[in-house]
Every structure is written in C-alpha cells, then in structure tokens.
Amino acid sequence: MLNNGNLLSVAKHINEQFVLSGVDRYSSETGICKADFIAIEPTDFDGDIYAIDGSNIVVCDWSVVHLNRIRAGYVTYNGRNWQRTVITHDDVFWADPRDYAEHFDHYLKGFFGLNGITFKESDLDRLSSYFRELQEYVALSDAINEAQPGDLILYDGAFDIFEPLRDVLKQILRSAEEKRVDLIGISKSSSLSWGNKISLPFVKHTSFVGSQLMPNVPWYLSLQNKNVDCGPGKWDGETFVVRFDGQSSHAFRVDVPSYISDRISAIMGKLAAYSCSAECLGYPHALFRVHRDIRITKDEGHFLQLKLMNLLGEMGVKESKIMMLMEDYHDVLEMRHGDMEA
C-alpha cells in the first residue's frame, strides 16, 4: 500500500529544496549574479542551418540481446525556410554484448578512420544507445561536409560525453573547425546540477532565476568558474545555459567548441533569431523539425515486430515458437488480469 506519509515527506522536500522562491540561495551557492546573464540580440544571417538528431526504439527484447530500430539524419534550413530532410541511417541493430564489434567497426573505420572499439563491461547494456550516437555522428559528419563556411550546425545533444566515442567527437570538432562552420550542441535535457548539500537541477533553476533577473529578453550564461557540476569535462569547449526567447519559460544547456569562442555573442544572436516559432517557442526550429522528421514511433516498432514474425513464419518456424520468442510475460499477466476483471 502506498505510504502517504512518505509521499508527504517527499512533497515537503521538493517544496523546501527544489522550489525556488527567490535568487539569494542560488546566487550564494553557485556564484552567479545578474551581471553573468548576457542579453542576446537576435540577428538574421544569410547562411544555412543544419540540425542533426537520431531515434532508437526496441523492437524485441530478449534480455541478453535486443533488436532495435535506429534512425539518424539531419534537416537543412535557409533562414526560416526548410530545404530538405536527409536520412543517413535507418535500419535494425542487433545489440549483442558478445557480437558488436563488426557493427561499430564498419562505421568507425569507414567514416572516421578509427581502429574499432572495445566497450567496458559497464557499457555493454548501452550498446544500442552508443550505436545510435555513432549514427548521429555519421549524420553530423555528413552535414559538415555539405555545409559552407559560416553555416550553422546544431547537434541535438551535449559534447561532454563519456569515453567510448570521444575520439569520434574529437574528429568531428576538428573537421568543423577546418570547414569553418559554427557547430553547437543543444540539449533538451541536462544533468547539470548545483547545491552544497544536495543535487539540484541547474538548468531549470537557472531558467527561473534568469526570468527574474532578465525578464522578457533572451540571454546566455557561461558556467566557467561557477560552482556547478558540469560532468566529466573531457572535451575542448565551454558550456552555457541559454534562453533563446524572452517569452519562453525554457532554457537549455548549450555546448560551444573552443574554436568559436571568439564569436559566441554573434552565434547566440543567430540562434535566437530562429527560435521564435509558435510551434516551439524558445527552441531552434530546425531542431524541432529534425526531431519530428527522424523520430521512430511506437507504431513503427510494432509494425517491424509483426514483419519479423511473418518472416519467421515464412521460414517454417511454428507460430507457438514465434510467440514464445516474441511475447513479454508482463503482457501475458496484463491480459490475464483483464480476463479476471471481465
């Protein structure tokens, strides 16, 4: 039975610790004051905008291995006008902890000239996530190749990543610098935290504080030399929190490579100019579009599972064995629960 006392305790804890009523505690513990919030002047520009994203859905789960569908690609905009959507990968991925090397090596060697990868045991349960990230980097590399100097390239995610794919990201940042394009990482969610005694959600609280100190204007905030847990810090760049539109209640983590550190204000102005769509106020519209175009729906995953079952049936596998392989016993229990209620 649900313990209402425990739930009440959690509610009190959220109210006392997570709900900010002012900015004093935030400022004293993070070292961030009003002067750290830099106003952004939205600025149109003549170049193209590229936005990269990926999607991953489990088709079948056998605990020891998974079958996933993974899709990655990018969209291109000129100003506020969509130009095209490019799918760079859309296929199934067999996530087997004992048989993954060939899948990764094909892309690591073919696209980035790297000599394969070996995952630690603690990473093996994230094989599908790593493969999706790798496909996003392939799409990102393709977008950089297509872009012209001065174009803006937006990656859906952070650049301060864990070890397995760091070498790939280093090559991508290097190629972006050589091509003289502006590459930015923008995260829809963030684990940045602050707090001397407990971990508090930094981006959400910064959004609130920024709204109090800089109302109705877009702004950006550098985390350099601030009392904020920024993660591993194993990349060559700087992390910001940014509100792209003054009327939006959302701010985002934004990663900026060091090679464009001398034009941060100008880049923020470009991003703000293209983050005022009514469909996604305060979020770059190109990233909104690529998310919608690339995402894999549950219906697509279910259809792929049915297609796999049909293929097995055509190969002579009996229906009973197919069902044994495909069914999740949680679903069996739910169906039997429904029978009992009927």
Image (cartoon, rainbow, N blue to C red):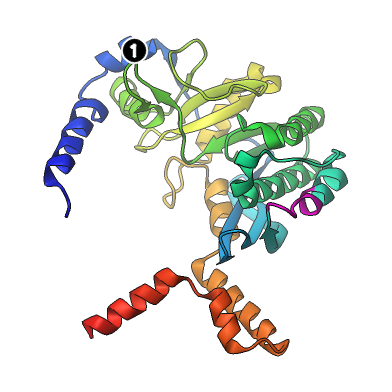
- Residue 180 appears in the picture as rendered: yes
- Residue 52 appears in the picture as rendered: no
- The amino acid beneath tag 1 is Glu
Mark 1: give few (<14), some (14-19) or many (20+) Cα within 10 Å.
Answer: some
Depth order, front residue of 172/340: 340
Q: x, y percentage for residue 228?
A: 44, 18
Depth order, front residue of 318/214: 318
- Is 117 a magenta residue? no
Depth order, front residue of 223/128: 128
Image quadrant occupied by the C terminus: bottom left
On screen, residue 3 above or below 62: above
Q: Which residues are magenta?
A: 97-104
Q: Which residue is mark 1?
A: 29
On screen, residue 219 above or below 34: below
Quarter-wise, where is residue 14 in the image? top left
On screen, residue 164 above or below 221: below
On screen, residue 309 above or below 44: below
Q: x, y percentage for residue 171?
A: 78, 32
Depth order, front residue of 152/302: 302
Image quadrant occupied by the N terminus: bottom left
Q: Residue at x 86, y 44 (%)?
A: 109
Q: Residue at x 64, y 41 (%)?
A: 121
Q: Residue at x 84, y 38 (%)?
A: 114
Query: In this image, 166 relative to 3: left or right?
Result: right
Q: x, y percentage for residue 241?
A: 47, 26
Q: x, y percentage for residue 258?
A: 67, 20
Total numbered circles: 1
Callout 1: SS: helix
